[in-house]
Amino acid sequence: MPLERRTPLRPRAKGKGNAAEREVVDLLRAYGWTSARRNFASGGYGGSDVVDGIPGVALEIKRQEACRIWSWIAQCEAAAKPTDTPIVVFRRNRSRWYGCLPLDDLLELLKLRET
């Protein structure tokens, strides 16, 4: 069930979101996921914001000053396939990117670093 917006996005907000998604796609490509691209249908029809990137991962990209992490997590989990790891990627102006993912998935990643 896709989330519905109460008021339509202003053009500037849409542009900021699109630019944020392009930034993250560029980062993914720089790290080796060269087929990563924006999901143009994500805004109104559901699905992850970035597709063909990291296999088994659903990314929700947010670039906002006010952090509403719980609603972002809910949105990401709703868009993710049951087998995907939901990751919210976010930043505010003049800040670096951060990622929020379930702790058990983070611990598995950290365990892989040790080997």
Image (cartoon, grey):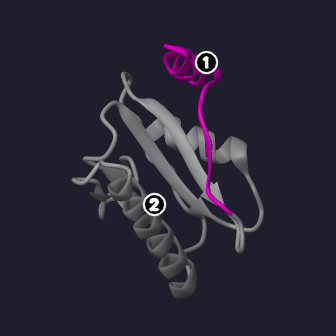
Contact between marks 1 and 2 (CB within 8 A): the answer is: no
Q: Which residue is mark 1?
A: 107
Q: Nearer the viewer, residue 42 or 97?
A: 97
Does the magenta portion include 110? yes
Marking on residue 25 = none
Residue 65 picture quarter: bottom right
Residue at 71%, 46% in the rendered image: 69
Residue 65 appears left or right of 54: right
**Going from the N terminus, do you reach mark 1 or mark 2 first?**
2
Residue 16 appears left or right of 80: right
Residue at 39%, 47% in the rendered image: 48
Does the magenta portion include 40? no
Q: Nearer the viewer, residue 22 or 28?
A: 28
Identify whether 90 is placed above or below 94.
Answer: above
Judge the density around disc 2: few (<14), some (14-19), many (≥20) Cα neighbours within 10 Å.
many
Q: Which residue is mark 2?
A: 24
Residue 4, given in percent of the width and then of the height, sits at 51, 56
Residue 18, given in percent of the width and then of the height, sits at 44, 73
Q: Amino acid at mark 2?
A: Val
Residue 22 picture quarter: bottom left
Judged from the image, the secondary structure of the residue bearing numbered disc 2 is helix
Can residue 43 be seen? no
Q: Amino acid at mark 1?
A: Leu
Residue 103, given in percent of the width and then of the height, sits at 65, 22
User: In this picture, which residue range is highlighted in magenta?
Assistant: 96-115
Q: Kindly give the residue lying farthest to the left in the view shown.
A: 35
Judge the density around disc 1: few (<14), some (14-19), many (≥20) Cα neighbours within 10 Å.
few
